[in-house]
Amino acid sequence: MANSTQLSAQHQFVYKEPGRFAGWPANGGIWHWEDEILVQFQIGAHDDSGGGHAISREEPSRQILARSLDGGETWAHEEIEVRPSESTSIDFAHPDFAMQCNGSRFRISYDRGKTWIGDYDLPEVRNKLTSRTDYLVNSTDDCHFFLSAKEERVQAGIQDRAFCARTTNGGESIEFVNWITDNIEVRSVMPSTVRISETHLVTALRRRHDTKQDDGTRLSKNWIEICHSTDNGTTWAFLSKAADTDGGAGRNGNPPSMVRLKDGRLCVTYGYRSTPYGIRAKFSEDNGKSWGNEIRLRDDARNWDLGYTRTIQRSDGKLVTLYYYTTAANPEQHIAATIWTVDAK
């Protein structure tokens, strides 16, 4: 397995503006077409006075896009343009297709995110949806969605449970398929899913469980868990634990971004919200059953307010990992990209 001594990495700014906070690309989404990369994230006024996320709650914030045409080397910023849908039928296999999910709604694009169509409704379940963007296109009419909903039985400060849904009629109807995890008390959210074969799916999940201590306080554990389905999403089972995401610091951990590489390995990236704060990665050579040594892409962050990675593989095999970050030299949270490789197995 690869280790940190084999890492070659370069870091780029994607969005950095004085007085501004930029964050949470995993809440927006990432899309790519060969070496054209598009990422969505939130921006607002920077305010580091409250002890929480360093974004002002008094001033408005908004979502924007950043696009690279050269595999993440340079970036341009774009506003999000949305127009109403004229048809309920969706061509998921369009070569320039993109889809963005947020809560109970989603929108689509047929021009690589230059314009968006929507919003459409996601399937109703018992409780409020808390979905982000994770989907697998199967054909023109067929698409898997990997979503989440509020679950009051979760023993964590934030209560979500991940599930799989599917359409086979171009989005005319989207049906609930199954819950991805069976432990209802443990938070599961923000899946990141890859297809191994026609029937085998593997997903990485953000997990959290809070336990009450003898002194009345609560201990929060946060980690990344791997589940898989061998019947194309109908049923799911635990596969492995990939990583801890805050070392017991109680900072709500971080979501995973998982990609299947051209050589068949899986790569998972995530922010680490304990010291040393930074961005980390692991590889699996057996479809997620086990994971190799942790690789520190960066460990120079100023504090815990970071991460929410999204990762893609370029045409030359290099990985591009995007995230939000803060350092002593650049304390205002910004969006950064690390272009990196490790020695081949």
Image (cartoon, grey):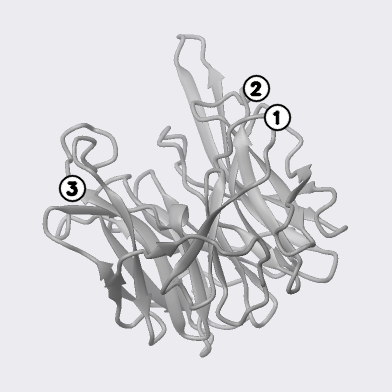
User: Eyeballing the image, is 60 above or below 64?
Assistant: above
User: Eyeballing the image, is 231 above or below 152?
Assistant: below
Mark 1 Cα shell of 10 Å, populated few (<14), some (14-19), many (≥20): some
Residue 184, which numbered label?
Answer: 1
| Quarter of the view holding residue 204 | bottom right
Question: Quadrant where the C terminus lies?
Answer: bottom right
Percent x, y for residue 191? 61, 51
Residue 45, which numbered label?
Answer: 3
Q: CA distance from mark 1 to mark 2?
A: 6 Å
Mark 3 or mark 2, whichever is nearer to me:
3
- Mark 2, residue position: 153
Percent x, y for residue 252? 45, 37
Q: In the image as oriented, which residue stretches furthest toward the left?
A: 18
Percent x, y for residue 41? 36, 58
Q: Nearer the viewer, residue 186 or 247?
A: 186
Mark 1 or mark 3, whichever is nearer to me:
3
SS at mark 1? loop
